Amino acid sequence: MKIVLVNKFLYKRGGSETYYLALADALEKSGHTVYFFGMRDEHNTPRPEEKYYIDNIDYEKEVSIVDQIRQGIKSIYSFEAKRKFEALVKEYKPDIVHLNLVHRQITLSILDVCKRYSIPVVFTTHDLVCACPVGSLLTPERKTCRACYGGKYINCVKNNCIKGSKAKSLVAFVEENFYRLHGSYNLISAYITPSAFHKNEIIKSGITKMPIHHITNFLPWGTEYKTYPGKKYFLFLGSLTKDKGVMTIVKGFHKSGIKDYQLLLAGTGPEEQALKEYIGANSLGDNIKLLGFVSGNALATLTQEAYTVIMASECYENCPYGLMEPMACGKPVIGAEIGGIPELAIEGVTGWTFESGNSDDLASAMQKAVSLSPEEYARLSKSTCEFAKEHFLVDNYITKLTNLYSDLLEK
């Protein structure tokens, strides 16, 4: 099959791009032909079809009022993306179009091209922006909100949900209402949600009548599913932000009273200074270490030698690679009960769960972890690795995906 993979960013930037690039590699190794469509960027790997990429759009930059208006219109329906995508389709004649992150920069304008040429469209939902204009189900005050479900997008404007800005929230309101009137979400042939949580939320939102398939994310070709002995440290991997619950992790470790283990946090972010102040004020410097950005072999070793990995998110994670990759190394996980995390962190099978944002509950989970005997830890590590292999194996994912592609083509 010939498949166009669409994503706004075409280089490894986050979890969505990790999936996107690994999917391209897996499809090509399975004998399919893959084309990319997205934004131009100096970080992109050169490809023949890059002549059709759209110009790079950065909505974080400060621009004039006139340019803000232009950007607002372009973020709803990009004629540039539609025109260039149609040129790509005419040259390469794909069988399937597979969307990933497309809102705001690429937009759903390209669906009109797919409709014109009768090309089935699959959409992997990496966030919930199709159901909630801000994509997180959280208000600016970090409270859970589903007020926009059922097409009630005016609530986004009332709550200034898009970065606290009335103007940006108004653009999102117009965008979602346009897609609703245009029937954009029903032009997508099938949805793939990496978590059951996301599938249920999209169903609740009522945005589409099309089929929704829950298929857990996969790990790339070459992933080795193997257990490693754990050293005496808890590990957090990710950005040091409030959404990731990093202060909850530090407070939970402090409250646990565990003395013969360390807590290592690998990453950078805006909460770094607050963490340093808390660690210093409570004389925790010997037991809690901020490692900064870690990558490559150093990151692999850090993960393999961890006792357990913690994900304390206070936002609705989907199917995070920050848990999947350590689980393939047999690392039991401690995960917050929010979003798709409990689908990976399963009590007694792959680790422990705790109430998101509750440092006391996290402290209790940490105490359970260190109370395991070596034999109990080895059994849990093996169970975690087996779970990962069963659910994250790339061969299984590609089989399910290409079967879906074939079904859509037959219809």
Image (spheres, rainbow, N blue to C red):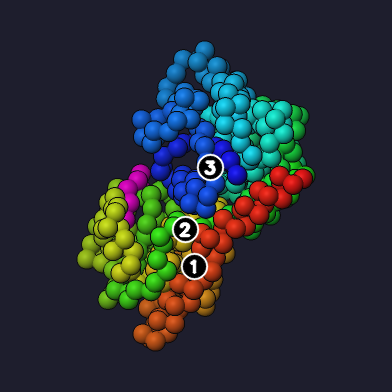
**Which quadrant holds residue 169?**
top right
Give, as a three-letter code, the residue at label 2. Answer: Leu
The secondary structure type at the circle numbered 1 is: helix
Between discs 3 and 2, the one toward the N terminus: 3
Q: CA distance from mark 3 to mark 2?
A: 20 Å
Side (left or right) of 210 relative to 317: right
Between discs 1 and 3, the one toward the N terminus: 3
Q: Position of residue 331 (x, y in %)?
A: 40, 70
Q: Quadrant of the C terminus?
A: top right
Above or below — where is 332 with respect to 70?
below
Q: CA distance from mark 1 to mark 2?
A: 9 Å
The secondary structure type at the circle numbered 3 is: strand
The reply to whether residue 318 is in sight is: yes
Which mark identifies residue 388?
1
Which stretch did the figure color magenta?
266-271
Count every numbered label the image shows and give the total: 3
Of tags 1 and 3, which is closer to the observer? Answer: 3
Which mark identifies residue 33?
3
Which mark identifies residue 184?
none
**Which quadrant holds residue 73?**
top right
Q: Position of residue 350 (x, y in %)?
A: 49, 72
Side (left or right) of 328 relative to 398: left
Crowding around mark 2 (Cα neighbors within 10 Å: few <14, some 14 to 19, many 20+) is many
**Residue at 70 percent of width and 30 percent of height:** 117
Which mark identifies residue 219?
2
Q: Position of residue 338 (x, y in %)?
A: 56, 59
Give, as a three-letter code, the residue at label 1. Answer: Ala
Task: Kindly check if marks 1 and 2 are in contact, taking CB atoms under 8 A apart as contact.
Answer: yes
Residues 159 and 202: in front is: 202
